[in-house]
Amino acid sequence: MSAYDVLAALSDPTHLDGPGLNLQAYAEESSSTFLPNGRLVIALMGDIDSDEGSITQGELRIVDLEKSGETKVVRSVGQLGTIFALGSDPLLALYDHPRLINLVTGKEVYKW
């Protein structure tokens, strides 16, 4: 997954030719959403370099785009699929069935 500074790209289009904010977020499956405070949450699942991809591990990366991509990694409860921010916490994950995920612990707090 890549992210770019829009203002930098508008002043210098070659910015889009590079790594952008260099998030180093590579996975077989990924989804992302913005929190109200401007941080980017990325859900990653599976190893992009492996044919067998890990199906039991997943992680959330919470990236502070204003602090040069400062990242917090949170181990999550398996596959999350498409994610949506519901305020600052929790996160709505829609893989298989709707679930609420705590952004601090990565644990499921509610499912239906």
Image: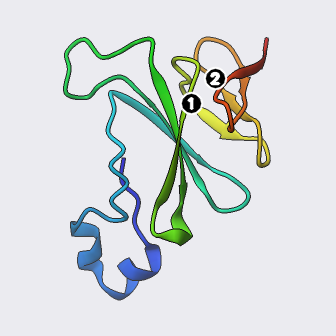
Q: Which quadrant of the view contains residue 44?
A: top left
Residue at which label 1 appears: 82
Q: Is residue 75 above or below residue 86?
A: above
Q: Which quadrant of the view contains residue 13?
A: bottom left
**Residue type at the position of mark 2:** Leu
Where residue 25 appears, as percent x and y from the top left, is 36, 44
Residue 49 relative to residue 15: left or right: left
Where residue 30 appears, as percent x and y from the top left, is 43, 34
State the SS at label 1.
loop
Where residue 102 appears, as percent x and y from the top left, is 72, 32
Chosen colour scheme: rainbow
Tell me, for residue 22, which label it has, or none: none
Q: Is residue 9 above or below residue 39?
A: below
Residue sitting at the far bottom: 11
| Residue drawn at 20 percent across, 20 percent down | 50
Choose the circle earlier in sequence order: 2 or 1.
Answer: 1
| Residue drawn at 71 percent across, 61 percent down | 37
| Residue drawn at 77 percent across, 48 percent down | 88
Where residue 1 appears, as percent x and y from the top left, is 36, 46
Residue at which label 2 appears: 94
* Callout 2–callout 1 Cβ contact below 8 Å: yes
Q: Total label count? A: 2
Residue 12 relative to residue 70: left or right: left
**Residue type at the position of mark 1:** Thr
Where's the C terminus, which quadrant? top right
